[in-house]
Amino acid sequence: MYTIKDIAELAGVSRRTLHYYDEKELLKPTMVGDNGYRYYDDDALLQLQQILLYREMGITLQQIKQILTQPDFDKIIALRTHRQHLREEIGRLQTLVQTVDTTLMHLVGEVKMSDKTIFKGFNDAKQEAYEQEAVEQWGNSAAQSIQLWRSYSDERKQAILQEGNQIYLEITANMDKGADHPDIRALLVRWHEHLYHFYEPTIEVLEGLGAMYHDHPDFNATFTAIDPDLPAFLKAAIAIYVDELETQWLARELGILEESA
């Protein structure tokens, strides 16, 4: 049995919320002790999970109650439905992340690999309008990246672009060694550090970039112009690099947990 304090901490909800769910007959305690304390069993825990999952889907509490009280309600079927919905939502969010990343990279010019520019044909007024639109849609992350890029001098901007171009050229020159070769990993470490000139390159961002370099038409065309095999190679090499970073992160987290145990 779990106390209301246990449930609140496990689920990350407030006790007041649990009291409210009780009042609305969404989640009744399994038993109430002589001292008036509420206690919940494992079934109640799963019921709360269902409530929170449906809330994530934007369903009202009244609708959730109707769903959960149906005689033929099946937790397994419901969980499968939740899983499908979440996978679709993940796909949608990943697409949005790629859209944001692409826009930011366009705005700061990180994809400029040759004399051709992704801003060709854009005048300053139009470019400012696009930047303002990015800020309005994506908020601080876009604004901070744009502000960071604008803080550089023209000479610094050129040096950063040349540095990035050199990294990609060196990767191209070493592709025959294989995506998992130490020399490629060393170049990806440089690439990773280079991205700090534009924004915070989290593991999630790196993973998205790896896929986008191959899958997004603009990036694919840019890297294909350097070498037709480069987009696919970058996708594979970055995936290996990200896996290593995730493994290192997990090892650190497990080490912290073991130390605190």
Image (spheres, rainbow, N blue to C red):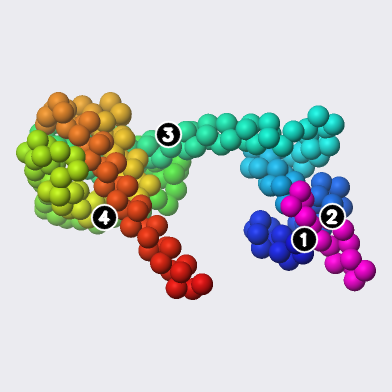
Front residue of 212 and 146: 212
Whole-number angstrom distance, CA of label 3 to CA of label 2: 42 Å
Q: Earlier in the sequence, mark 3 or mark 2?
A: 2
Whole-number angstrom distance, CA of label 2 to CA of label 1: 9 Å
Residue tagged 4: 196
Residue tagged 2: 30
Task: Give the magenta part as a residue range.
Answer: 29-44
Residue tagged 3: 95
Q: Which of marks 4 and 2 is nearer the N terminus?
A: 2
Please indicate whether residue 69 sits to the left or right of residue 246 in the image: right
Residue 84 visible here: yes
Q: Residue at x 12, y 37 (%)?
A: 175
Label 1 crowd bin: few (<14), some (14–19), many (20+), radius 10 Å: some
Whole-number angstrom distance, CA of label 4 to CA of label 3: 22 Å
Whole-number angstrom distance, CA of label 3 to CA of label 1: 42 Å
Whole-number angstrom distance, CA of label 4 to CA of label 1: 49 Å
Please indicate whether residue 124 sits to the left or right of residue 141 in the image: left
Residue tagged 1: 1
Q: What element carries label 1?
A: loop
| Image quarter in which the N terminus is found | bottom right
Residue 147 spot, x, y in % from top left: 31, 53
Give, as a three-letter code, the residue at label 3: Thr
Give, as a three-letter code, the residue at label 1: Met
Q: Which residue lies furthest to the bottom in this view?
A: 260
Q: In which quarter of the image is residue 172?
A: top left
Front residue of 58 and 249: 249
Q: Is mark 2 on a helix, strand or loop?
A: loop
Q: Which residue is drawn at 38% across and 63% down?
A: 252
